């Protein structure tokens, strides 16, 4: 669990940096590893979707583990219900952000072929990055609550070794 959670944080940071670099690239089109803006956005797109899939997989996996643990140890359904509530809190805004990013990644091609003005793309890019930051705050809160849920469920209290 800890490995996946730390990996989610690291990948989120790397994705955020890639988004910032891609945004800067949209103004001057400077190359990064010989990649122009469109090519770097494809890389950023793959990185972004991998990261968000990993986060979703983390919550699905821990939810299944919570359900199995509660069934095995004959605990009440409240732990599993809380796990589902966490997913209800994180998935809708996360999926909305994925939709926003899909639109952004498609607009790269439209800007590259001069079908959409660059300033519209950059304005949408800012909105997507701001929403991405909002999602990361929600994810952080859900990671904390998920960890507290698992510690509480397993009988480990905070502050004990």
Image (cartoon, rainbow, N blue to C red):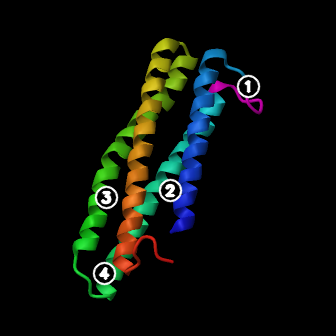
Q: Residue at x 48, y 49 (%)?
A: 52
| Residue at point 38%, 45% (across, down) | 94
Mark 3 residue crowding within 10 angstroms, few (<14) / some (14–19) / many (20+): some
Percent x, y of residue 17? 61, 37
Q: Between marks 3 and 2, how big is the CA–CA gap? A: 16 Å
Asked whether residue 159 appears in the rendered view, the answer is: yes
**Is residue 83 shown left or right of residue 119?**
left
Q: From mark 3 to mark 4, how far is it between C-alphas? A: 17 Å
- CA–CA distance in space, label 1 to label 3: 40 Å
* Label 4 sits on residue: 70
Which span of residues is magenta-colored? Answer: 31-37
Q: CA distance from mark 4 to mark 2?
A: 24 Å
Which is more foreground, mark 1 or mark 4? 4
- Gap in angstroms between the C-alphas marked 1 and 4: 52 Å
The answer to whether residue 78 is magenta is: no
Q: Which secondary structure lies at badge 2?
A: helix
Q: Measured along the vertical axis of the image, is residue 139 above or below residue 79?
A: above
Pointer 3 residue: 86
For mark 2, what is the residue?
A: 54
Residue 129: numbered disc? none
In the displayed structure, 40 sits above or below 93; it is above
């Amino acid at each position: 669990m800890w490995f996946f959670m730390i990996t989610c944080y690291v990948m989120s940071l790397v994705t955020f940096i890639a988004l910032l670099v891609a945004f800067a690239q949209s103004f001057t089109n400077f190359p990064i590893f010989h990649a122009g803006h469109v090519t770097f956005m494809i890389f950023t797109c793959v990185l972004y979707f991998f990261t968000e899939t990993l986060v979703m997989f983390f919550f699905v996996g821990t939810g299944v583990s919570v359900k199995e643990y509660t069934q095995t140890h004959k605990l009440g359904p409240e732990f599993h219900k809380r796990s589902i509530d966490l997913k209800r809190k994180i998935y809708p805004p996360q999926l909305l952000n994925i939709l926003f990013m899909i639109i952004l990644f498609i607009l790269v091609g439209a800007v590259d072929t001069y079908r959409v003005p660059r300033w519209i793309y950059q304005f949408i890019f800012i909105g997507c990055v701001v929403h991405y930051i909002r999602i990361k705050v929600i994810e952080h809160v859900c990671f904390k609550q998920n960890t507290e849920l698992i510690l509480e469920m397993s009988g480990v209290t905070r502050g004990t070794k």
